[in-house]
Amino acid sequence: MTRPLDLDGPDVPPDVPPDVSPDASEPIDPAGSRPGLSTFTIEGRAAPGLFVVGWLATIAGLALVLIGALAASGLFLYFLGPLLLTVGLVAGAGNQAIERRARGFPYPGPSPYLVLAATVAAVYVVASSIGLILQLTLRGVDVPDYWVNLILVSLQAVVFIGILRLTVVGTDALSWAEMGWRRFDGSALRDLLFGATVAVPVIGLTSIVAYVLVSAFKVVPESPLPPTGVAAGLVVQLIAGAVIAPIAEEAVFRGFAISAWRRTVGERGAIVRASLVFALAHVINVSADSLGEASGLIVVGFASRLPVALALGWLFIRTRSIWAPIGLHMTFNGILLLVAEYYRANPIAV
């Protein structure tokens, strides 16, 4: 006997979205059979132009980066290659968002890996361009390094927010509110202060991990914002490292990455993935005189950032607010900058 038709709605449990099968983990493709996201074909694509531009520009960008590395060409390695990579990865992110929405994915946006790669490439383009401009315009002028650092950190923050706006918010994958941003009111202030209180135990754990690793590998990573020895330098470093950088990094690694991954791999998986990528992003620019030294610096820099990265992710999930991890990140960086400045002025006799 056939069942009577339900004229009031679909015959599925009410808590199951209409574009997802109640008996399968994969979303139903409402447009019929569509090519997979990694299949190299334009047939059946919702945005074939973006797909082609994404692949071609990315391949060309990688080729130029490789040529730049082999030929020691800064133009190819730090500007032209990353520029094409940025175009290709942003186009790929747009295509992926369109395809995932058409296929009914729980998170209808670009992969965090793709967005983060586009962000890194764009940072290289902007940093190399502005660095060259500063060299030409400030030639013969004695400008303290901390002012240059402030400019570069500020531009990096603009790139972070700009790429998020273009590839995530602009594609309707996630809104700013869904990424934990809300008006800074009394509740947000409480979250900020709550995050700040977590900084001291996290610094303690980080210090233990760093001490063990430094003792084992006999290398000490250089601070991206080294102490300056002057009051003006300390103030500028605090603005750059304890205000601007934490806001930009939390927008990307917690607000965006965890919010996106939480829909696909759950909260724990999202925290772990975002933490690993966060730690990895901080050792990309490691330089050393030997392979052994470089390996040690990567291990020490990567592992010593995991405690704070995991704490930042836990705070974001617990509070559902971006302000809590920003509070921890600001306080963590601020204390470390103050301690470094103090020991520069009062070195320990060995």
Image (cartoon, helix red, strand yellow):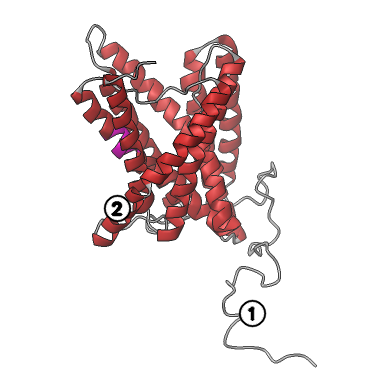
Q: Is residue 245 visible?
A: yes
Q: Nearer the viewer, mark 1 or mark 2?
A: 2
Q: Residues within 10 Å of mark 2 (few under 14, many from 20)?
A: some
Res. 336 image quadrant: top left
Q: Position of residue 245 (x, y in %)?
A: 35, 37
Q: Name the residue at the left extreme.
A: 232
Q: How many marks?
A: 2
Q: Which residue is mark 2?
A: 193
Q: Is residue 98 visible?
A: no
For the point 31% across and 36% down, which residue is it? 334
Q: Quadrant of the N terminus?
A: bottom right
Which three-letter amino acid code belongs to the residue tagged 2? Leu
In this rendering, position of residue 81 left or right of residue 180: right
Q: Which residue is mark 1?
A: 12
Instruction: Say whether residue 140 is magenta.
Output: no
Q: Earlier in the sequence, mark 1 or mark 2?
A: 1
Q: Position of residue 280 (x, y in %)?
A: 53, 34
Q: What element does badge 1 sit on?
A: loop
How far apart are the alpha carbons under marks 1 and 2? 45 Å
Q: Residues within 10 Å of mark 1 (few under 14, many from 20)?
A: few
Res. 344 image quadrant: top left
Numbered range of the magenta stretch? 239-245
In this rendering, position of residue 67 left or right of residue 345: right
In this rendering, position of residue 298 left or right of residue 328: right
Q: Nearer the viewer, residue 51 or 153?
A: 153
